[in-house]
Amino acid sequence: MNIYDIAREAGVSIATVSRVLNHKNTVSPATRARVEQVLAQHSYTPSAIARGLVSKSMRTVAILTVDIRFPHYANTAYTIEREFSHRGYDVLLCNTGGDRDTVLRYLRAVLKKQVDGIVLVGSVFNEICHGEEMRSLLCRVPIVLANGKLDLPGASSVLVDDRAGVALAVDHLVSRGRRHLFYIQDKYTTSAEDKCAGFLQAMERAGLDPAGRVVRTHDTLEDGMQAARDILAGDLPCDAIVCGEDLTAAGALKALLRDGVAVPGQVAVTGYNNSAYAYLCEPVLTTVDNKGEQAAQLCVQLLGSCIEKGGSAATVTIQPELVAGKTS
């Protein structure tokens, strides 16, 4: 039994059946009662495609994220899913691992399901969303990129001023008398490069020489530990370590404490993201709040406007805030 069968048995158009299913008030009481009786007789549950026949909307969106195991991505995706769910949308969540081929595969799949829009979560999509097929797929429905910007028609962006965010950490440390700062860059995305640039610029504004004070590694606990040990084993003095992610900062903090370095007495440590990792540390990590929940809500507002009102693509920039813990 499908929507066509329901319409035929009730003696109405499929548009009328759809209006009844979607609780529109443009159907007469008698007609509504007749359609509802047929629906009840057959225990009919409409498919998404049937619901979308008249409304031209499947009331479905897709979220493509990088790695749901990381709290920042998980919290952002969760907030987007909850907000769209409250608006009556079904949500498809795709964990891509930041792999271009996987992104292409998921894009083909969700577009085949006729989603109304797509949210991309993570600045890595700046690097992988290129090429003719990728651009063609992304142009089919409204897109919002969280923490990045795509040069595509109909693509909205929610940006975080990551340069300013890291600069907040540097300024905070300098105001507390730190002069020998290091930066651990743990990713190689647009966002990560902006964070590193923010460190270099803030150091120069403070009259400090940043030469040789950037260490590049990966965003794992173990890599953060090793990076901190490499810094202290080097030739340059160090009294503060600024990290591009909370997880890396947690690793740096762990290594320092294990090796008997007083934090923040001898070396201060700051992270970034204001994630759960910051609060699992002892002492609690000083971090930068990049407003993940606010970014998620803005993604929903921008994409919802494009889907429901035909709104134009827009770009919004969020200003991070320093969250002072006990490590600085």
Image: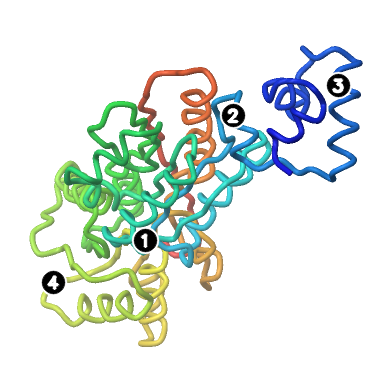
The residues tagged by marks 4 and 2 sit, at their Cα atoms, a distance apart of 67 Å
Q: Amino acid at mark 1?
A: Glu
Q: Which residue is mark 4?
A: 236
Residue 94 picture location, percent across and down:
46, 56
222 vs 234, left or right, is right
Answer left or right for 156 relative to 301.
Answer: left
Give the Cα distance between marks 3 and 4.
78 Å
- Point out residue 48 in the picture as x, y percentages from the top left corner: 62, 40
Identity, as a three-letter code, of the amino acid under mark 2: Leu
For the residues marked 3 and 2, what is the alpha-carbon distance in whole angstroms? Answer: 18 Å
Look at the picture and state if 61 lies above or below 104: above
Callout 3: helix, strand or loop?
A: helix
Residue name at image x 47 percent, y 31 percent: 303
Identity of the residue drawn at 19% across and 67% down:
216
- State the residue position of label 1: 245
Of the two numbered discs 4 and 2 on the same chain, state the one appearing first in sequence: 2
Q: CA distance from mark 1 to mark 4?
A: 23 Å
Amino acid type, label 4 = Leu
